[in-house]
Amino acid sequence: MQVLGEIIKKAVSLADKIISNPDPVEAQKKELRELLSKAQDTAFGKYYQFKKLLSPDDPRDAFAREIPIHSYDKMHQEWWQKVTEGAEDITWPGKVRYFAVSSGTTSKKKHIPVTDDMLKSIRNAGLQQFKGIADFDLPAEFFEKELLLFGSSTNLKKVNDHYEGEISGISASQLPFWIEGYYRPGKEISAIDDWDERVEALAKAAPHWDIGSISGIPSWIELMLKKVMEYHNLKNIHEIWPNFRVFTSGGVAFEPYKKSFERICGKPITVIDTYLASEGYLATQIRKDTDAMALITDNGVYFEFVPFKPENINDDGSIREGAKALKIDEVEEDVEYVLIISTVAGAWRYMIGDTIKFTDKKRCEIKITGRTKHYLNVVGSQLSVIQMNRAMEELSDKEVINVKEFTVAAILEEGDYLHRWYLGTDDDDPKDEKEIANLLDNILKDNNKNYKVARSKALKSVEVKVIPASLFQLWSEQTNQKGGQVKVARVMKEEDFKEWEAFVEKESKS
């Protein structure tokens, strides 16, 4: 294991030299030129005349002027459908061997191309993550411990002449050779399709491993750890993995899970946030002094930012035609933006669907604040997910309720609108739902003037339903897929919300 520890330390040093870039503006200019140059002879590049866009020294303005912003539906219908059918050189040179299948937060399946260049980009971003770990004052022996990556199955589905799976499964199936010696649960267990069977196999093998770090989506990692503890009759996970020190969180904010992780851990752990989406590895936390993540600006992704304002967003969460996208040197701190990316997977001015804000512009550090579709504005309330998350945190800070999961919808009843919230908690004591509703309502009024105005007019009332947090996981299992990249929609449309309420009622009676 000492040899492996030295390899990882060298990888950390290599990441520091290769991936760090003190000038993100110049890095982004270079990335765009390289993207345009490499894709200029593709069908997309010829259609939008990439060769002309490469004429100026700084092609960013011409690129934004000539290329429209693409939603997934637009990109798929006009271009990626041909790629899934096996066509080559459509939006990126060559033939695509892998597709990341993502359910997102709706039932609709998305097929995102994952090119060889994208896999290389993800591996490079992994080195950036290792570089970040070096800043957290971890003991030298930590780098000799094993890494548990637990996401989707690596048993990818063969469809025609390509393979499909979730991005975590694709990434885990393409790990570099030097990591295999300490990667857990290993190829055999990782390839098990059924999540429960995979967890059971993992639990059986757990005593033979010396886990130092774990990576995955918090909700599913928490459930997996509880299964391991139950299998071995443990009080906490450190009884079996005493050297577990680092949890690399991805997909959702870790804060709602902080207290439950503390309950299942016997020692303090370091939490490092990452931003691995189906479309690429976009950012990672590299400093211990913040929980924000640094955009990786020199690794096959070009970023743009549309201010997340009502005048820029359609009711379906898409960006309105004519909305201006800002370059990385034009953004401001503490302003919400819709993230637009162009990548080595052949995504061009692609609206990933996430909203972010810069916490440190100079370091290009960001936080994910929500989803464009998770924006509640039916009666002018203009509630974003970041405001909802803050309200949940305040409820926890006031020791009213510890909310791990939540969803909300605008309901029309007898001619009036109301907001109905479902709050998922692990708290054992009964909660006064009317008291929580009043407190939540007041918190939102204090922090959002548009919401306060809406409450005095069209938004007549607020309701809260407190349910076990486990129901959210069960809903994900039944409507999407257990584990992996699955997330619950924070804001539901009326049709989906009716299904959700029927599900909750049925499970509450059983």
Image: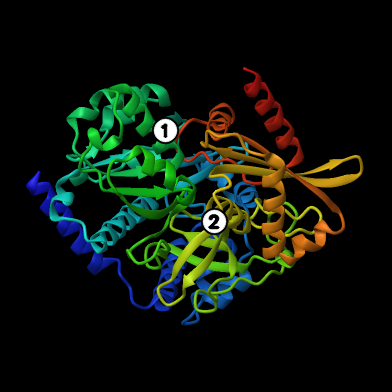
Residue 56 x/y as whole percent = 50, 81
Task: Label 1, secondary structure: give it.
Answer: helix
Task: Label 2, secondary structure: give it.
Answer: helix
Instruction: Tell me the residue at 87%/58% (across/down).
Output: 457
Q: Is residue 95 visible?
A: no
Task: For the residues labelled 1 and 2, say whether their Cβ atoms are less than 8 Å apart.
Answer: no
Q: Is residue 105 visible?
A: yes
Residues 288 and 391: in front is 391
- From mark 1 to mark 2, how far is it between C-alphas? 45 Å
Q: Nearer the viewer, mark 1 or mark 2?
A: 1
Residue 427 x/y as whole percent = 52, 37
Residue 36 x/y as whole percent = 47, 67
Colour pattern of the rendering: rainbow
Q: Badge 1 is on which residue?
A: 223
Residues 383 and 336: in front is 383
Instruction: Tell me the residue at 71%/27% (across/down).
Output: 502
Q: Quadrant of the N terminus?
A: top left
Which residue type carries mark 1?
Leu
Left/right placement of residue 163 relative to residue 438 reads left
Image quarter for residue 242? top left
Residues 252 and 245: in front is 245
Which residue type carries mark 2?
Ala
Q: Badge 2 is on which residue?
A: 43
